[in-house]
Amino acid sequence: MAGDTLAIHRYGYQDLSIPITDDTYYQIELTPLAINLPAINAYSQRRLPTGQQAYQIITGEQLSPTALAYKVPALILRRYGGSAGVTTIAINGSPSNHTKVILENVDLTDPLMGQTDLSQLPGSLLREITVEPNPGINQGSGAMGGAIYLHAVPENSSATITAGQNGYRATDVHIKWNRPRLTGSATLGQVNDGGNYPVVWRDSTIIRRNNHYNQRSGTLNLNYLPSDRHFGNLFIMVSDQERGIAGVIWSPTPDASRNSILQIANLSWGRILSHGIIKFRFSNRHSALEYRDPQSAIDSRHISNTQILRLSVRSKMWPAFSFTSFVEGRAEAISSSDAGNHDRMLLAAALLGDMALGRSFRFKPSCRYDFAPNLYSQSSFDLTLSYFPFNPVKLDASVGTAFRYPTFSDLYWLPGGNPDLQPENSAYFALSASLDLPGETMVRLYHSQRISNDLIQWIPDGATSRAVNLARTRNIATALTVSGKLPPGHWRYDLGLNHFHAANLETGTTLLNIPGWTAHGRLWFQNNDITSGINLAYEGQRIRGYSWPNHVYLEAFLTMDIFASYSLPIRRQRMDFQAYLSNLTNKNYMTIYGYPEAGRALRVAITFNFNQS
Protein backbone atom coordinates (compact mmCIF):
# COMPACT_ATOMS: atom_id res chain seq x y z
CA MET A 1 0.00 0.00 0.00
CA ALA A 2 1.08 3.56 -0.57
CA GLY A 3 3.20 4.78 2.33
CA ASP A 4 4.65 1.36 3.18
CA THR A 5 8.33 0.45 2.69
CA LEU A 6 9.61 -2.50 0.68
CA ALA A 7 12.80 -4.02 2.19
CA ILE A 8 14.87 -6.37 0.02
CA HIS A 9 17.64 -8.58 1.44
CA ARG A 10 19.52 -10.87 -0.93
CA TYR A 11 22.80 -12.70 -0.29
CA GLY A 12 25.56 -11.18 -2.38
CA TYR A 13 23.83 -7.83 -2.90
CA GLN A 14 23.44 -4.61 -0.90
CA ASP A 15 20.25 -4.26 1.13
CA LEU A 16 17.63 -1.97 -0.42
CA SER A 17 14.61 -0.18 1.10
CA ILE A 18 12.18 1.80 -1.09
CA PRO A 19 8.92 3.53 -0.22
CA ILE A 20 5.83 2.30 -2.06
CA THR A 21 3.81 4.89 -3.99
CA ASP A 22 0.68 4.60 -6.03
CA ASP A 23 2.65 3.21 -8.97
CA THR A 24 1.81 -0.42 -9.73
CA TYR A 25 5.07 -1.41 -11.52
CA TYR A 26 8.61 -1.39 -10.16
CA GLN A 27 11.88 -2.31 -11.88
CA ILE A 28 14.50 -2.87 -9.19
CA GLU A 29 18.25 -3.31 -9.80
CA LEU A 30 20.32 -4.47 -6.83
CA THR A 31 23.96 -3.46 -6.33
CA PRO A 32 26.37 -6.42 -6.04
CA LEU A 33 28.16 -6.67 -2.71
CA ALA A 34 31.57 -8.33 -2.32
CA ILE A 35 31.33 -10.98 0.38
CA ASN A 36 34.22 -11.19 2.82
CA LEU A 37 35.02 -14.88 3.28
CA PRO A 38 37.59 -16.33 5.72
CA ALA A 39 40.98 -17.29 4.34
CA ILE A 40 41.22 -20.73 2.75
CA ASN A 41 44.52 -22.57 3.12
CA ALA A 42 44.51 -25.00 0.20
CA TYR A 43 46.57 -28.17 0.17
CA SER A 44 46.85 -30.50 -2.80
CA GLN A 45 48.55 -33.77 -3.51
CA ARG A 46 46.55 -34.70 -6.54
CA ARG A 47 47.13 -37.35 -9.11
CA LEU A 48 47.57 -35.84 -12.56
CA PRO A 49 46.77 -37.63 -15.81
CA THR A 50 50.42 -37.74 -16.92
CA GLY A 51 51.59 -39.51 -13.76
CA GLN A 52 52.81 -36.28 -12.18
CA GLN A 53 52.17 -35.36 -8.55
CA ALA A 54 51.32 -31.84 -7.37
CA TYR A 55 52.02 -30.31 -3.95
CA GLN A 56 51.00 -26.90 -2.65
CA ILE A 57 52.72 -24.66 -0.13
CA ILE A 58 50.87 -24.52 3.20
CA THR A 59 50.45 -21.09 4.78
CA GLY A 60 53.49 -20.48 6.96
CA GLU A 61 55.75 -22.93 5.15
CA GLN A 62 56.93 -20.33 2.65
CA LEU A 63 59.14 -18.97 5.43
CA SER A 64 61.15 -22.20 5.42
CA PRO A 65 64.50 -22.16 3.60
CA THR A 66 64.18 -25.92 2.96
CA ALA A 67 60.41 -26.40 2.49
CA LEU A 68 60.91 -28.56 -0.61
CA ALA A 69 62.54 -31.27 1.53
CA TYR A 70 59.28 -31.79 3.40
CA LYS A 71 57.05 -31.91 0.35
CA VAL A 72 58.45 -33.95 -2.49
CA PRO A 73 58.88 -37.70 -1.99
CA ALA A 74 62.30 -39.13 -2.82
CA LEU A 75 63.83 -35.64 -3.00
CA ILE A 76 67.38 -35.00 -1.76
CA LEU A 77 68.37 -31.40 -0.95
CA ARG A 78 72.06 -30.49 -1.11
CA ARG A 79 73.19 -27.10 0.21
CA TYR A 80 76.56 -25.50 0.87
CA GLY A 81 75.46 -24.19 4.28
CA GLY A 82 73.03 -21.37 5.12
CA SER A 83 71.15 -18.95 2.87
CA ALA A 84 74.31 -18.02 0.98
CA GLY A 85 75.10 -21.60 0.01
CA VAL A 86 74.41 -22.91 -3.48
CA THR A 87 71.39 -25.25 -3.26
CA THR A 88 70.65 -28.14 -5.62
CA ILE A 89 68.12 -30.96 -5.59
CA ALA A 90 67.91 -34.52 -6.86
CA ILE A 91 65.09 -37.05 -7.19
CA ASN A 92 65.14 -40.81 -6.69
CA GLY A 93 68.75 -40.96 -5.55
CA SER A 94 70.12 -39.59 -8.81
CA PRO A 95 72.82 -36.89 -9.14
CA SER A 96 71.67 -33.26 -9.17
CA ASN A 97 72.51 -32.94 -12.86
CA HIS A 98 69.93 -35.67 -13.60
CA THR A 99 67.05 -33.55 -12.27
CA LYS A 100 65.47 -30.74 -14.26
CA VAL A 101 63.92 -27.69 -12.58
CA ILE A 102 61.32 -25.83 -14.65
CA LEU A 103 59.89 -22.45 -13.57
CA GLU A 104 56.77 -21.37 -15.50
CA ASN A 105 57.87 -23.39 -18.57
CA VAL A 106 61.47 -22.11 -18.48
CA ASP A 107 64.24 -24.68 -18.10
CA LEU A 108 66.53 -23.34 -15.37
CA THR A 109 69.41 -25.74 -16.08
CA ASP A 110 72.76 -23.97 -16.28
CA PRO A 111 74.45 -25.18 -19.50
CA LEU A 112 77.87 -24.69 -17.90
CA MET A 113 77.37 -26.87 -14.82
CA GLY A 114 74.28 -28.87 -15.85
CA GLN A 115 72.21 -28.18 -12.73
CA THR A 116 70.01 -25.53 -11.10
CA ASP A 117 70.90 -23.37 -8.11
CA LEU A 118 67.64 -22.93 -6.17
CA SER A 119 69.15 -20.16 -4.04
CA GLN A 120 68.76 -17.85 -7.05
CA LEU A 121 64.96 -18.16 -6.92
CA PRO A 122 62.85 -15.93 -4.63
CA GLY A 123 61.31 -18.34 -2.11
CA SER A 124 58.22 -16.15 -1.65
CA LEU A 125 57.17 -16.83 -5.25
CA LEU A 126 56.77 -20.59 -5.02
CA ARG A 127 53.10 -21.59 -4.76
CA GLU A 128 52.88 -25.09 -6.20
CA ILE A 129 55.34 -27.85 -7.04
CA THR A 130 54.72 -30.59 -9.59
CA VAL A 131 56.94 -33.67 -9.85
CA GLU A 132 57.37 -35.88 -12.90
CA PRO A 133 59.44 -39.05 -12.35
CA ASN A 134 60.25 -39.95 -16.00
CA PRO A 135 60.13 -36.76 -18.09
CA GLY A 136 62.81 -37.64 -20.66
CA ILE A 137 60.53 -37.33 -23.69
CA ASN A 138 59.28 -33.90 -22.62
CA GLN A 139 62.56 -32.47 -21.32
CA GLY A 140 65.32 -34.35 -23.18
CA SER A 141 68.93 -34.12 -22.02
CA GLY A 142 69.48 -34.11 -18.27
CA ALA A 143 66.05 -35.38 -17.18
CA MET A 144 67.16 -38.94 -16.40
CA GLY A 145 66.18 -38.72 -12.72
CA GLY A 146 63.06 -36.58 -12.94
CA ALA A 147 61.75 -33.04 -13.25
CA ILE A 148 60.32 -30.51 -10.80
CA TYR A 149 57.96 -27.84 -12.12
CA LEU A 150 57.66 -24.68 -10.01
CA HIS A 151 54.67 -22.35 -10.28
CA ALA A 152 55.10 -18.79 -9.09
CA VAL A 153 51.87 -16.87 -9.77
CA PRO A 154 50.66 -15.17 -6.52
CA GLU A 155 47.17 -15.88 -5.19
CA ASN A 156 46.25 -12.22 -4.67
CA SER A 157 47.65 -8.74 -4.14
CA SER A 158 49.62 -8.53 -0.92
CA ALA A 159 52.54 -6.99 0.92
CA THR A 160 54.75 -8.97 3.33
CA ILE A 161 57.41 -8.03 5.84
CA THR A 162 59.55 -10.85 7.29
CA ALA A 163 62.16 -10.83 10.05
CA GLY A 164 64.24 -13.60 11.56
CA GLN A 165 67.30 -14.58 13.52
CA ASN A 166 70.85 -14.25 12.19
CA GLY A 167 69.95 -10.87 10.67
CA TYR A 168 67.25 -12.06 8.26
CA ARG A 169 64.97 -9.37 6.73
CA ALA A 170 62.70 -9.59 3.68
CA THR A 171 60.04 -7.49 1.94
CA ASP A 172 57.71 -8.69 -0.81
CA VAL A 173 54.97 -6.92 -2.77
CA HIS A 174 52.59 -8.86 -5.03
CA ILE A 175 50.09 -7.17 -7.34
CA LYS A 176 47.44 -9.12 -9.22
CA TRP A 177 44.76 -7.85 -11.60
CA ASN A 178 41.92 -9.23 -13.69
CA ARG A 179 40.43 -7.69 -16.82
CA PRO A 180 38.01 -9.23 -19.32
CA ARG A 181 40.79 -10.15 -21.76
CA LEU A 182 43.93 -9.54 -19.73
CA THR A 183 44.96 -10.97 -16.37
CA GLY A 184 48.34 -10.61 -14.78
CA SER A 185 50.53 -10.21 -11.77
CA ALA A 186 53.76 -8.47 -10.80
CA THR A 187 56.05 -8.94 -7.82
CA LEU A 188 58.97 -7.16 -6.23
CA GLY A 189 61.08 -8.63 -3.45
CA GLN A 190 64.19 -8.03 -1.42
CA VAL A 191 66.03 -10.31 1.04
CA ASN A 192 68.86 -9.29 3.37
CA ASP A 193 70.32 -12.08 5.47
CA GLY A 194 73.29 -11.46 7.80
CA GLY A 195 73.84 -15.19 7.60
CA ASN A 196 76.47 -15.65 10.32
CA TYR A 197 75.52 -18.48 12.68
CA PRO A 198 77.23 -20.66 15.33
CA VAL A 199 78.05 -24.33 14.67
CA VAL A 200 79.81 -27.02 16.66
CA TRP A 201 82.99 -28.36 15.06
CA ARG A 202 85.33 -30.80 16.82
CA ASP A 203 83.75 -30.04 20.22
CA SER A 204 84.16 -26.28 19.78
CA THR A 205 81.57 -23.63 18.89
CA ILE A 206 82.58 -21.66 15.78
CA ILE A 207 80.79 -18.73 14.13
CA ARG A 208 80.30 -19.24 10.40
CA ARG A 209 81.27 -15.80 9.08
CA ASN A 210 81.14 -14.21 5.63
CA ASN A 211 77.82 -15.94 5.05
CA HIS A 212 75.67 -12.91 4.18
CA TYR A 213 73.11 -13.08 1.39
CA ASN A 214 71.33 -10.19 -0.36
CA GLN A 215 68.78 -10.73 -3.12
CA ARG A 216 66.59 -8.45 -5.23
CA SER A 217 63.96 -9.90 -7.54
CA GLY A 218 60.99 -9.05 -9.70
CA THR A 219 58.50 -10.87 -11.92
CA LEU A 220 55.83 -10.05 -14.47
CA ASN A 221 53.16 -12.49 -15.63
CA LEU A 222 50.57 -11.62 -18.31
CA ASN A 223 47.78 -13.77 -19.78
CA TYR A 224 46.01 -12.38 -22.84
CA LEU A 225 42.87 -13.69 -24.57
CA PRO A 226 42.33 -11.60 -27.72
CA SER A 227 39.57 -13.97 -28.92
CA ASP A 228 37.84 -17.19 -27.97
CA ARG A 229 40.40 -19.19 -29.98
CA HIS A 230 43.68 -17.40 -29.30
CA PHE A 231 45.63 -17.12 -26.05
CA GLY A 232 49.03 -15.80 -25.03
CA ASN A 233 51.29 -15.68 -21.99
CA LEU A 234 54.37 -13.70 -21.01
CA PHE A 235 56.43 -14.49 -17.92
CA ILE A 236 59.59 -12.58 -16.92
CA MET A 237 61.75 -12.95 -13.83
CA VAL A 238 64.92 -11.10 -12.83
CA SER A 239 66.87 -12.04 -9.72
CA ASP A 240 70.30 -10.89 -8.61
CA GLN A 241 72.27 -12.07 -5.60
CA GLU A 242 75.29 -10.81 -3.71
CA ARG A 243 76.65 -13.24 -1.14
CA GLY A 244 79.67 -14.10 0.91
CA ILE A 245 81.29 -17.53 0.72
CA ALA A 246 82.23 -18.88 4.12
CA GLY A 247 84.25 -21.79 2.72
CA VAL A 248 84.69 -25.21 4.31
CA ILE A 249 84.57 -25.28 8.09
CA TRP A 250 88.28 -26.15 8.49
CA SER A 251 89.49 -23.63 5.90
CA PRO A 252 87.29 -20.47 5.95
CA THR A 253 87.40 -17.87 3.17
CA PRO A 254 86.62 -14.56 4.93
CA ASP A 255 87.04 -12.43 1.80
CA ALA A 256 85.40 -14.64 -0.85
CA SER A 257 82.20 -13.47 -2.58
CA ARG A 258 79.80 -14.71 -5.24
CA ASN A 259 77.69 -12.29 -7.26
CA SER A 260 75.15 -13.59 -9.76
CA ILE A 261 72.18 -12.57 -11.84
CA LEU A 262 69.48 -14.78 -13.34
CA GLN A 263 67.09 -13.52 -16.02
CA ILE A 264 64.40 -15.72 -17.55
CA ALA A 265 61.56 -15.04 -19.97
CA ASN A 266 58.88 -17.17 -21.58
CA LEU A 267 56.55 -16.09 -24.38
CA SER A 268 53.88 -18.45 -25.63
CA TRP A 269 51.04 -18.07 -28.12
CA GLY A 270 48.40 -20.63 -28.97
CA ARG A 271 45.30 -21.25 -31.04
CA ILE A 272 42.46 -23.63 -30.27
CA LEU A 273 41.68 -25.84 -33.26
CA SER A 274 38.59 -27.88 -33.95
CA HIS A 275 40.33 -31.03 -32.65
CA GLY A 276 43.16 -29.69 -30.50
CA ILE A 277 45.65 -26.89 -29.82
CA ILE A 278 48.69 -25.53 -31.65
CA LYS A 279 51.17 -23.63 -29.50
CA PHE A 280 54.34 -21.64 -30.10
CA ARG A 281 56.76 -21.05 -27.22
CA PHE A 282 60.02 -19.13 -26.93
CA SER A 283 62.04 -19.06 -23.71
CA ASN A 284 65.31 -17.43 -22.74
CA ARG A 285 67.60 -18.04 -19.79
CA HIS A 286 70.55 -15.72 -19.10
CA SER A 287 72.87 -15.91 -16.11
CA ALA A 288 76.08 -14.19 -15.11
CA LEU A 289 78.28 -15.23 -12.22
CA GLU A 290 81.44 -13.82 -10.64
CA TYR A 291 83.33 -15.66 -7.91
CA ARG A 292 86.21 -13.86 -6.20
CA ASP A 293 88.57 -14.91 -3.44
CA PRO A 294 91.52 -12.49 -3.02
CA GLN A 295 93.07 -14.82 -0.46
CA SER A 296 93.57 -17.46 -3.18
CA ALA A 297 93.92 -15.02 -6.11
CA ILE A 298 90.70 -16.35 -7.72
CA ASP A 299 88.63 -14.16 -10.03
CA SER A 300 86.29 -16.43 -11.96
CA ARG A 301 83.57 -15.16 -14.34
CA HIS A 302 80.93 -17.09 -16.24
CA ILE A 303 78.10 -16.01 -18.56
CA SER A 304 75.64 -18.50 -20.02
CA ASN A 305 72.66 -18.20 -22.35
CA THR A 306 69.99 -20.68 -23.42
CA GLN A 307 67.24 -19.99 -25.95
CA ILE A 308 64.54 -22.56 -26.72
CA LEU A 309 62.01 -22.38 -29.54
CA ARG A 310 59.26 -25.02 -29.52
CA LEU A 311 56.24 -25.59 -31.77
CA SER A 312 53.78 -28.15 -30.44
CA VAL A 313 50.49 -29.57 -31.64
CA ARG A 314 48.02 -31.42 -29.43
CA SER A 315 45.18 -33.20 -31.18
CA LYS A 316 42.32 -35.52 -30.24
CA MET A 317 41.14 -37.06 -33.48
CA TRP A 318 39.00 -39.74 -31.84
CA PRO A 319 37.52 -40.07 -28.32
CA ALA A 320 39.89 -42.92 -27.44
CA PHE A 321 43.09 -41.50 -28.98
CA SER A 322 45.04 -38.25 -28.72
CA PHE A 323 48.60 -37.24 -29.44
CA THR A 324 51.06 -34.43 -28.86
CA SER A 325 53.96 -33.68 -31.17
CA PHE A 326 56.61 -30.98 -31.06
CA VAL A 327 59.77 -29.79 -32.71
CA GLU A 328 62.32 -27.86 -30.72
CA GLY A 329 65.53 -25.94 -31.24
CA ARG A 330 67.84 -25.08 -28.36
CA ALA A 331 70.86 -22.77 -28.57
CA GLU A 332 73.36 -22.87 -25.69
CA ALA A 333 76.38 -20.61 -25.26
CA ILE A 334 78.90 -19.79 -22.53
CA SER A 335 81.68 -17.30 -21.98
CA SER A 336 83.79 -18.53 -19.08
CA SER A 337 87.15 -17.59 -17.61
CA ASP A 338 87.70 -21.28 -16.76
CA ALA A 339 86.01 -23.11 -19.64
CA GLY A 340 86.43 -20.70 -22.58
CA ASN A 341 83.86 -19.53 -25.12
CA HIS A 342 81.67 -22.22 -26.66
CA ASP A 343 78.24 -22.68 -28.18
CA ARG A 344 76.15 -25.50 -29.62
CA MET A 345 72.80 -26.09 -31.26
CA LEU A 346 70.49 -28.91 -30.08
CA LEU A 347 67.52 -30.00 -32.20
CA ALA A 348 64.71 -32.35 -31.17
CA ALA A 349 61.40 -33.81 -32.36
CA ALA A 350 58.98 -35.90 -30.32
CA LEU A 351 55.65 -37.70 -30.59
CA LEU A 352 53.57 -38.61 -27.52
CA GLY A 353 50.45 -40.74 -27.83
CA ASP A 354 47.59 -41.49 -25.43
CA MET A 355 45.02 -44.17 -26.20
CA ALA A 356 42.29 -45.82 -24.16
CA LEU A 357 42.12 -49.61 -24.45
CA GLY A 358 38.65 -50.35 -23.20
CA ARG A 359 37.56 -49.04 -19.81
CA SER A 360 40.42 -50.41 -17.73
CA PHE A 361 43.61 -49.74 -19.71
CA ARG A 362 45.38 -46.69 -21.05
CA PHE A 363 48.53 -46.91 -23.20
CA LYS A 364 50.95 -44.02 -23.71
CA PRO A 365 53.72 -44.63 -26.27
CA SER A 366 56.23 -41.80 -26.75
CA CYS A 367 59.43 -41.33 -28.71
CA ARG A 368 61.98 -38.56 -29.24
CA TYR A 369 64.98 -37.87 -31.45
CA ASP A 370 67.73 -35.40 -30.52
CA PHE A 371 70.48 -34.16 -32.77
CA ALA A 372 73.47 -31.94 -32.00
CA PRO A 373 75.18 -31.09 -35.34
CA ASN A 374 78.78 -32.36 -35.52
CA LEU A 375 78.47 -33.73 -31.96
CA TYR A 376 75.84 -36.32 -31.01
CA SER A 377 72.51 -37.88 -31.92
CA GLN A 378 70.19 -39.68 -29.51
CA SER A 379 66.93 -41.63 -29.74
CA SER A 380 64.76 -42.21 -26.67
CA PHE A 381 61.36 -43.68 -25.94
CA ASP A 382 58.87 -44.27 -23.13
CA LEU A 383 56.04 -46.83 -23.00
CA THR A 384 53.56 -46.47 -20.15
CA LEU A 385 50.62 -48.78 -19.50
CA SER A 386 48.01 -47.79 -16.90
CA TYR A 387 45.49 -50.23 -15.47
CA PHE A 388 42.36 -49.25 -13.52
CA PRO A 389 41.07 -52.51 -12.02
CA PHE A 390 38.42 -50.64 -10.03
CA ASN A 391 37.68 -47.05 -9.13
CA PRO A 392 40.14 -46.14 -6.31
CA VAL A 393 43.08 -48.17 -7.66
CA LYS A 394 45.52 -47.27 -10.43
CA LEU A 395 48.56 -49.29 -11.54
CA ASP A 396 51.27 -47.99 -13.88
CA ALA A 397 54.20 -49.67 -15.59
CA SER A 398 56.80 -47.80 -17.67
CA VAL A 399 59.89 -48.73 -19.64
CA GLY A 400 62.08 -46.36 -21.58
CA THR A 401 65.42 -44.71 -22.22
CA ALA A 402 66.92 -41.31 -21.43
CA PHE A 403 70.22 -39.47 -21.89
CA ARG A 404 72.34 -36.50 -20.83
CA TYR A 405 74.76 -34.58 -22.99
CA PRO A 406 78.06 -33.55 -21.36
CA THR A 407 77.95 -30.02 -19.98
CA PHE A 408 80.37 -27.32 -21.11
CA SER A 409 82.16 -27.76 -17.77
CA ASP A 410 82.53 -31.52 -18.36
CA LEU A 411 84.00 -30.86 -21.79
CA TYR A 412 86.17 -27.78 -21.44
CA TRP A 413 86.89 -26.86 -17.79
CA LEU A 414 90.60 -26.29 -17.13
CA PRO A 415 91.97 -28.38 -15.66
CA GLY A 416 90.06 -31.65 -15.98
CA GLY A 417 87.63 -31.10 -18.85
CA ASN A 418 87.44 -33.91 -21.40
CA PRO A 419 86.34 -33.03 -24.98
CA ASP A 420 86.13 -36.76 -25.80
CA LEU A 421 83.30 -37.46 -23.35
CA GLN A 422 80.28 -39.35 -24.67
CA PRO A 423 76.65 -38.69 -23.64
CA GLU A 424 75.26 -40.63 -20.73
CA ASN A 425 72.60 -43.17 -21.71
CA SER A 426 70.17 -45.01 -19.48
CA ALA A 427 67.41 -47.59 -19.70
CA TYR A 428 64.78 -47.83 -16.98
CA PHE A 429 61.61 -49.48 -15.85
CA ALA A 430 59.22 -48.13 -13.22
CA LEU A 431 56.19 -49.53 -11.40
CA SER A 432 53.72 -47.55 -9.34
CA ALA A 433 50.45 -48.22 -7.54
CA SER A 434 48.04 -45.59 -6.26
CA LEU A 435 45.11 -46.16 -3.93
CA ASP A 436 42.48 -43.61 -2.91
CA LEU A 437 40.70 -44.46 0.34
CA PRO A 438 37.89 -42.79 2.32
CA GLY A 439 38.84 -39.72 4.30
CA GLU A 440 40.88 -38.30 1.40
CA THR A 441 43.59 -40.87 2.12
CA MET A 442 46.03 -41.53 -0.72
CA VAL A 443 48.64 -44.29 -0.74
CA ARG A 444 51.30 -44.45 -3.46
CA LEU A 445 54.11 -46.94 -3.96
CA TYR A 446 56.77 -46.26 -6.58
CA HIS A 447 59.72 -48.42 -7.63
CA SER A 448 62.23 -47.81 -10.41
CA GLN A 449 65.48 -49.26 -11.65
CA ARG A 450 67.82 -47.52 -14.04
CA ILE A 451 70.94 -48.84 -15.76
CA SER A 452 73.24 -46.06 -17.00
CA ASN A 453 76.13 -46.34 -19.42
CA ASP A 454 78.96 -43.83 -19.64
CA LEU A 455 77.90 -41.96 -16.49
CA ILE A 456 80.03 -38.79 -16.28
CA GLN A 457 81.90 -38.29 -13.02
CA TRP A 458 84.91 -36.29 -11.89
CA ILE A 459 87.57 -38.50 -10.32
CA PRO A 460 90.88 -37.61 -8.63
CA ASP A 461 93.84 -37.30 -10.97
CA GLY A 462 96.95 -36.28 -9.09
CA ALA A 463 96.46 -32.85 -7.55
CA THR A 464 93.27 -32.18 -9.57
CA SER A 465 90.27 -34.10 -10.94
CA ARG A 466 89.19 -35.04 -14.43
CA ALA A 467 85.89 -35.92 -16.10
CA VAL A 468 85.47 -39.51 -17.30
CA ASN A 469 82.72 -41.84 -18.51
CA LEU A 470 82.10 -44.65 -16.03
CA ALA A 471 81.20 -47.86 -17.82
CA ARG A 472 78.00 -48.97 -16.10
CA THR A 473 75.95 -48.00 -13.03
CA ARG A 474 72.64 -49.08 -11.50
CA ASN A 475 70.23 -46.81 -9.59
CA ILE A 476 67.33 -48.33 -7.63
CA ALA A 477 64.69 -46.17 -5.93
CA THR A 478 61.63 -47.18 -3.92
CA ALA A 479 59.22 -44.63 -2.44
CA LEU A 480 56.12 -45.06 -0.28
CA THR A 481 53.90 -42.06 0.47
CA VAL A 482 50.71 -41.85 2.51
CA SER A 483 48.59 -38.74 3.03
CA GLY A 484 45.14 -37.96 4.34
CA LYS A 485 42.96 -36.51 7.08
CA LEU A 486 42.56 -37.41 10.73
CA PRO A 487 39.21 -37.21 12.56
CA PRO A 488 37.41 -34.88 13.00
CA GLY A 489 38.93 -33.51 9.79
CA HIS A 490 40.98 -30.52 10.91
CA TRP A 491 44.22 -32.51 11.01
CA ARG A 492 46.14 -33.64 7.94
CA TYR A 493 49.26 -35.74 7.55
CA ASP A 494 51.78 -36.53 4.82
CA LEU A 495 54.36 -39.32 5.26
CA GLY A 496 57.07 -40.61 2.96
CA LEU A 497 59.73 -43.33 3.16
CA ASN A 498 62.37 -43.76 0.45
CA HIS A 499 65.17 -46.24 -0.20
CA PHE A 500 68.00 -45.71 -2.70
CA HIS A 501 70.84 -47.82 -3.97
CA ALA A 502 73.27 -46.54 -6.60
CA ALA A 503 76.41 -48.49 -7.48
CA ASN A 504 79.15 -48.85 -10.05
CA LEU A 505 78.42 -52.26 -11.59
CA GLU A 506 82.06 -52.82 -12.53
CA THR A 507 83.44 -52.38 -9.01
CA GLY A 508 80.30 -52.93 -6.92
CA THR A 509 81.04 -49.66 -5.08
CA THR A 510 78.16 -47.47 -3.90
CA LEU A 511 78.23 -44.07 -5.59
CA LEU A 512 79.17 -41.01 -3.58
CA ASN A 513 76.65 -38.80 -1.74
CA ILE A 514 73.63 -41.10 -2.15
CA PRO A 515 71.88 -41.85 1.20
CA GLY A 516 70.45 -45.33 1.62
CA TRP A 517 67.26 -44.07 3.31
CA THR A 518 65.37 -40.80 3.47
CA ALA A 519 62.01 -39.97 5.02
CA HIS A 520 59.73 -37.01 5.54
CA GLY A 521 56.67 -36.38 7.65
CA ARG A 522 54.20 -33.53 8.06
CA LEU A 523 51.32 -33.12 10.48
CA TRP A 524 49.29 -29.93 10.49
CA PHE A 525 46.04 -28.47 11.77
CA GLN A 526 43.68 -26.20 9.84
CA ASN A 527 40.55 -24.67 11.34
CA ASN A 528 39.00 -21.45 10.10
CA ASP A 529 41.80 -18.86 10.34
CA ILE A 530 44.41 -20.95 12.18
CA THR A 531 47.07 -23.22 10.69
CA SER A 532 49.85 -24.93 12.62
CA GLY A 533 52.01 -27.97 12.08
CA ILE A 534 55.29 -29.83 12.34
CA ASN A 535 57.70 -31.00 9.62
CA LEU A 536 60.32 -33.73 9.92
CA ALA A 537 63.02 -34.80 7.46
CA TYR A 538 65.51 -37.66 7.74
CA GLU A 539 68.52 -38.50 5.59
CA GLY A 540 70.59 -41.61 6.18
CA GLN A 541 74.35 -41.76 6.03
CA ARG A 542 76.12 -41.66 2.68
CA ILE A 543 79.68 -42.19 1.44
CA ARG A 544 81.50 -38.88 1.12
CA GLY A 545 84.88 -40.34 0.20
CA TYR A 546 86.42 -43.62 -0.82
CA SER A 547 89.21 -44.92 1.38
CA TRP A 548 90.86 -48.15 2.48
CA PRO A 549 90.12 -50.23 4.46
CA ASN A 550 86.90 -48.32 5.22
CA HIS A 551 85.05 -45.62 3.32
CA VAL A 552 84.42 -42.22 4.94
CA TYR A 553 80.75 -41.45 5.65
CA LEU A 554 78.64 -38.36 6.20
CA GLU A 555 76.44 -38.88 9.25
CA ALA A 556 72.68 -39.37 9.10
CA PHE A 557 70.48 -36.61 10.52
CA LEU A 558 66.88 -35.85 11.50
CA THR A 559 65.59 -32.28 11.47
CA MET A 560 62.33 -30.93 12.87
CA ASP A 561 60.54 -27.64 12.09
CA ILE A 562 57.29 -26.16 13.42
CA PHE A 563 55.11 -23.46 11.87
CA ALA A 564 51.93 -21.52 12.61
CA SER A 565 49.76 -18.85 11.01
CA TYR A 566 46.70 -16.81 11.92
CA SER A 567 44.46 -14.90 9.50
CA LEU A 568 42.56 -11.84 10.69
CA PRO A 569 39.77 -10.56 8.39
CA ILE A 570 39.62 -6.76 8.16
CA ARG A 571 36.53 -5.79 6.17
CA ARG A 572 37.40 -6.82 2.62
CA GLN A 573 41.07 -7.32 3.39
CA ARG A 574 42.99 -9.87 5.46
CA MET A 575 46.01 -9.74 7.72
CA ASP A 576 48.14 -12.90 8.05
CA PHE A 577 50.56 -13.50 10.94
CA GLN A 578 53.04 -16.32 10.32
CA ALA A 579 55.92 -17.93 12.18
CA TYR A 580 58.39 -20.69 11.28
CA LEU A 581 60.90 -22.22 13.68
CA SER A 582 63.47 -24.29 11.77
CA ASN A 583 65.77 -26.97 13.21
CA LEU A 584 63.81 -27.14 16.46
CA THR A 585 66.29 -29.51 18.14
CA ASN A 586 69.29 -27.36 17.10
CA LYS A 587 70.76 -30.31 15.19
CA ASN A 588 74.33 -29.92 13.95
CA TYR A 589 74.23 -31.47 10.45
CA MET A 590 75.55 -31.20 6.89
CA THR A 591 74.12 -32.11 3.50
CA ILE A 592 77.57 -31.56 1.93
CA TYR A 593 80.65 -32.37 3.99
CA GLY A 594 82.45 -29.31 5.28
CA TYR A 595 79.41 -27.01 5.07
CA PRO A 596 77.36 -27.22 8.30
CA GLU A 597 73.79 -25.91 8.27
CA ALA A 598 72.43 -23.30 10.66
CA GLY A 599 70.99 -24.28 14.02
CA ARG A 600 67.60 -23.35 15.44
CA ALA A 601 66.24 -20.12 13.92
CA LEU A 602 62.90 -18.28 14.04
CA ARG A 603 61.28 -16.31 11.23
CA VAL A 604 58.07 -14.28 11.56
CA ALA A 605 56.07 -12.46 8.91
CA ILE A 606 53.09 -10.13 8.58
CA THR A 607 51.18 -10.11 5.30
CA PHE A 608 48.46 -7.66 4.32
CA ASN A 609 46.19 -9.08 1.61
CA PHE A 610 44.25 -6.60 -0.50
CA ASN A 611 40.78 -6.90 -2.05
CA GLN A 612 39.71 -10.16 -0.42
CA SER A 613 36.26 -10.64 -1.90
Image (cartoon, rainbow, N blue to C red):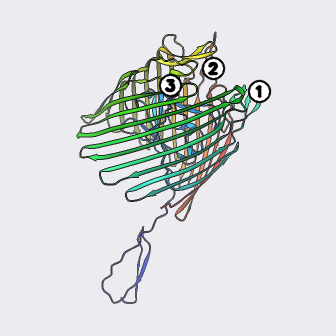
Residue beneath label 3, please? 408
The correct choice, above or below, for 44 with respect to 246 in the image is below
Q: Is residue 126 in sight in this rendering?
A: no
Q: Earlier in the sequence, mark 1 or mark 2?
A: 1
Crowd tier of the residue under label 1, counting other residues whose Cα lies within 10 Å: few below 14, some 14–19, many 20 or above: few
In the picture, measured across the screen, residue 223 lies left or right of residue 559, that is left
> Are dots 1 and 2 in contact, CB under 8 Å?
no
Q: Is residue 142 in sight in this rendering?
A: yes
- The amino acid on which the numbered mark 3 sits, given as a three-letter code, is Phe
Instruction: Judge depth for marks 3 and 1 and give the one in front.
Output: 3
- The amino acid on which the numbered mark 2 sits, given as a three-letter code, is Tyr
Crowd tier of the residue under label 2, counting other residues whose Cα lies within 10 Å: few below 14, some 14–19, many 20 or above: some
Query: What residue appears at the point 64 percent right and 14 percent down from the top-left corner?
Result: 463
Residue beneath label 2, please? 553
Most distant residue in the front direction: 341
Crowd tier of the residue under label 3, counting other residues whose Cα lies within 10 Å: few below 14, some 14–19, many 20 or above: many
Q: Which mark is residue 203?
A: 1
